[in-house]
Amino acid sequence: MTKVRMAADMSRADEDDLWRSGDVSLRPGFLIRRLHQIHTGLFLESCGEENITPVMYSVLSCLSQNGPLDQTTLAKAVAIDKTNMTDILKRLMNRGYVIREVADTDRRMRLTTLTAAGKAVLERTDPFARDAHRRTLDALSPQDRVRFTEMMMTIVAAAENDAV
């Protein structure tokens, strides 16, 4: 029996036995981390020339879709903490991909805006990022890709609701 079939056939008691067995390769956390590694590798391989990380790509995409945002809203939108967002924004500013300006409506707030160079790198990177996403899910049928994405969204939404 394959590991996939074993995992699919597990009852709660079987899950407990599996946990005690020590085969970490069947544990959800291990598989999630491993899939993240695989996707990140595919993304960096595809987008390597631009020297853009998946998180940087997410920030640029979010700004492209939503327009100027303050750091807190942007961090929440791409699901990273404000400290890491500060570092990412510094790197993106150093490359000329974003600028930060004082908001007209609230002088205490600084808004991050995508520059022309940021838009250009996003346009160049988009096809490669899409390819990395496709390659990540290539082993699944089109229907399973949709279902898998829906299941991930359900898990994330439940975890975010629990955190509130």
Image (spheres, grey):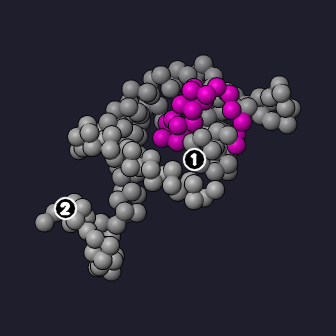
Residue 28 vs 22, above or below: the answer is above
Task: Look at mark 1 in the image and give the residue it sits on.
Answer: 79
Q: Earlier in the sequence, mark 2 or mark 1?
A: 2
Q: Nearer the viewer, residue 3 or 136?
A: 3
Picture residue at 39% right of the left edge, 44% below the top = 150
Q: Main secondary structure of the magenta part?
A: helix
**Can you name the residue that lies furthest to the left here?**
1
Q: Indicate left or right for 13 with 107 as reference.
A: left
The region drawn magenta spans 52-72
Label 1 SS: loop
Magenta includes 131? no
**Amino acid type assigned to the residue bearing label 2 in the image:** Arg
Image quadrant where one finds the N terminus: bottom left
Residue 25, image x and y in percent? 30, 66
Is 125 rendered above or below residue 137? above
Residue drawn where x is 52% and y is 42% of the image: 55
Q: Residue 40: image x %, image y %? A: 41, 46
Q: Residue 66 lies in magenta, yes or no?
A: yes
Residue 5 got which mark?
2
Q: Residue furthest right?
A: 107
Left or right: 58 as drawn, with respect to 104: left
For residue 34, the mark is: none
Q: Is residue 153 left or right of residue 19?
A: right
Separation of marks 2 and 1 at Cα, in angstroms = 33 Å
Residue 1 visible, this orientation: yes
Q: Secondary structure at mark 2?
A: helix
Which of labels 2 and 1 is toward the front? 2
- The amino acid type, in three-letter code, at marker 1 is Ala
Q: Looking at the image, which residue is at 22% across and 65% down?
A: 9
Q: In which quadrant will I find the C terminus?
A: bottom right
- What residue lies at 39% left-to-right and 26% top-to-bottom? 127
